[in-house]
Image (cartoon, rainbow, N blue to C red):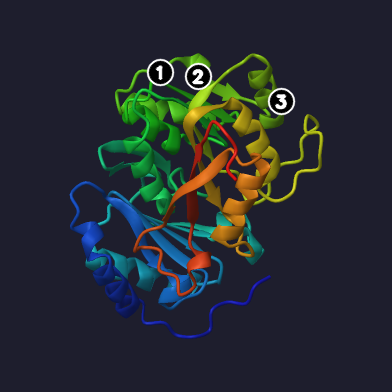
C-alpha cells in the first residue's frame, strides 16, 4: 500500500497557476474538455485533474484523500463545476468504494465538446472515463484527412478517433475492439452527433483473427488508426507472442490492407523508445512501403520537461514502391 501524502500542498495556488497556463484552452469556444492539472510536472506527482464540460475528474496515485475537500474548493474557485469526482488508483490498495469520492454534485455522466464533436464520458468508472484528452490534435488531424476515405479504427475504445473520421466526411469507418461494453458507447457517440452509422461497421473481436480474414477477403482501406495499448493482449490467433504494443506484427497486417496513398496514424506509448526508433520500426516492418510524413503530440495541458514522456503520434503514408 502506498503511503499517504504527508507534505502540505497549497492546492489553490497550484490550481490557479495551472489554470492560467491553460488560458488559450478555456478561452477557446470550440473546446470545453482538457487536462486542468498535470501533477507530474505541476507540483503533485501522481495527481491529474481533467475537465469534461462542467465536470471535473481527479485521479490520484498518491493518497491525497485528506486534501480532497481543499482541492474541491480550489476547483470551484476557478470554474463553476457542477460535478467533481475523485478516483484513487488501484495501487493504493483500497477498495473501489474507498477510493472513489463524489465531491460535488450527483451526476456521473457528462457530455463534452471538442471542435464540433460531442463525446459522452462516464465520470465514475475506474479508468479513463471515455475520452483521452492528450489525443486532441490527433483527432483534429484525422478529421481533416478523412474525406472520401475508407478508414479502419483498430483498438477503437469509445471510438473518438474513428468518429473524427466520420465527422471529416469519411466514406466509411470500421471500428474494431475486443470489449463488449465499448461498442454501444461508440454508437452512442455517433447518435449524439447525428452521424449515421451501420451496426455492421462496429466489430467486436480479436484483431489477430479479424485482420487476416480481412486481408484474405481483399479488403482495402485509405486510412488506418492504430492505437494499441502499452501491452497488447496475448491472442490464440496470433502466430507469435505479442510484445508491448506489438507494432511490427500489426504493421505487417496494416500494410496489406492499405491502398497506395493511404495513411496509418500510429500512437506510441513506450517511454524507452524514441520517435525515430518507432518510425524506423514501422518502415522496416512494412518492407519500406510506409514512410513517415508528420508527427503530432499532446497539447499545452500536458506539460512535460522530457518530450518523450508526452504522447507521440506519427503519420505514415503508403507508397506504391518500397523506398531506397
How many neighbours does mark 1 have within 10 angstroms: few (below 14), some (14-19), or many (20 or more)?
some
> The C terminus lies in which quarter of the figure?
top right
Question: Disc 2 and disc 3: Cα gap in Å?
Answer: 16 Å
Q: Position of residue 217 (x, y in %)?
A: 64, 14
250 versus 259 height, above or below? below
For disc 3, the marked residue is: 209
The residue lying toward the viewer, choosing from 126 and 276, is 276
Displayed quadrant of residue 246: top right
Residue shown at 71% from the left, 41% from the top: 233
Res. 253 image quadrant: top right
Q: Looking at the picture, does residue 210 appear above or below residue 246?
A: above
Select label 1 or label 3 by which is in front.
Answer: 3
The residue positioned farthest toward the bottom in the image shown:
7
**Mark number displayed over residue 201:** 2
Which residue is tagged 1?
A: 197
What quarter of the picture does the N terminus occupy? bottom right
Numbered disc 2: secondary structure: helix
Residue in view at x 32 percent, y 30 percent: 167
Mark 2 or 3, nearer chain start: 2
- Mark 1 and mark 2 residues within 8 Å of each other at the beta carbon: yes
State if disc 3 and disc 2 touch (CB < 8 Å): no
* Helix, strand or loop status at disc 3: helix
x and y, in percent, of residue 204 in the image? 61, 25
Along the line of sight, which residue is nearer the eye, 57 or 201? 201
Q: Residue at x 44, y 85 (%)?
A: 8
Amino acid at each position: 500500500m502506498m503511503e499517504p501524502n504527508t507534505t502540505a500542498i497549497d492546492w489553490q495556488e497550484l490550481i490557479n497557476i495551472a489554470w492560467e497556463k491553460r488560458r488559450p484552452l478555456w478561452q477557446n469556444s470550440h473546446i470545453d474538455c482538457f487536462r486542468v492539472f498535470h501533477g507530474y510536472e505541476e507540483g503533485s506527482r501522481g495527481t491529474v485533474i481533467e475537465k469534461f464540460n462542467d465536470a471535473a475528474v481527479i485521479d490520484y496515485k498518491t493518497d491525497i484523500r485528506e486534501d480532497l475537500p481543499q482541492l474541491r474548493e480550489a476547483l470551484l474557485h476557478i470554474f463553476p463545476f457542477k460535478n467533481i469526482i475523485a478516483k484513487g488508483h488501484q495501487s493504493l490498495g483500497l477498495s473501489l468504494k474507498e477510493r472513489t469520492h463524489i465531491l460535488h454534485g450527483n451526476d456521473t455522466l457528462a457530455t463534452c465538446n471538442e471542435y464540433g464533436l460531442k463525446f459522452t464520458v462516464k465520470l465514475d468508472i475506474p479508468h479513463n472515463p471515455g475520452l483521452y484528452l492528450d489525443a486532441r490534435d490527433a483527432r483534429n488531424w484525422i478529421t481533416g484527412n478523412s474525406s472520401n476515405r475508407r478508414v479502419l479504427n483498430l483498438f477503437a475504445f469509445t471510438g473518438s478517433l474513428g468518429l473524427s473520421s466520420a465527422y471529416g466526411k469519411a466514406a466509411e469507418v470500421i471500428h474494431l475492439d475486443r470489449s463488449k461494453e465499448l461498442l454501444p458507447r461508440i454508437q452512442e457517440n455517433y447518435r449524439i452527433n447525428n452521424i449515421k452509422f451501420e451496426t455492421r461497421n462496429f466489430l467486436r473481436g480479436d484483431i489477430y483473427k479479424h485482420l487476416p480474414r480481412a486481408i484474405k477477403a481483399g479488403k482495402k482501406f485509405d486510412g488506418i488508426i492504430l492505437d494499441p495499448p502499452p501491452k497488447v493482449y496475448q491472442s490464440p490467433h496470433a502466430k507469435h507472442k505479442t510484445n508491448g504494443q506489438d507494432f511490427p506484427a500489426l504493421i505487417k497486417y496494416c500494410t496489406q490492407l492499405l491502398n497506395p496513398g493511404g495513411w496509418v496514424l500510429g500512437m506510441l506509448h513506450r517511454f524507452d523508445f524514441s520517435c525515430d526508433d518507432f518510425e524506423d520500426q514501422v518502415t522496416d516492418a512494412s518492407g519500406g512501403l510506409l514512410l513517415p510524413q508528420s508527427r503530432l503530440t499532446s497539447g499545452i495541458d500536458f506539460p512535460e520537461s522530457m518530450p518523450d514522456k508526452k504522447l507521440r503520434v506519427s503519420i505514415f503514408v503508403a507508397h506504391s514502391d518500397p523506398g531506397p
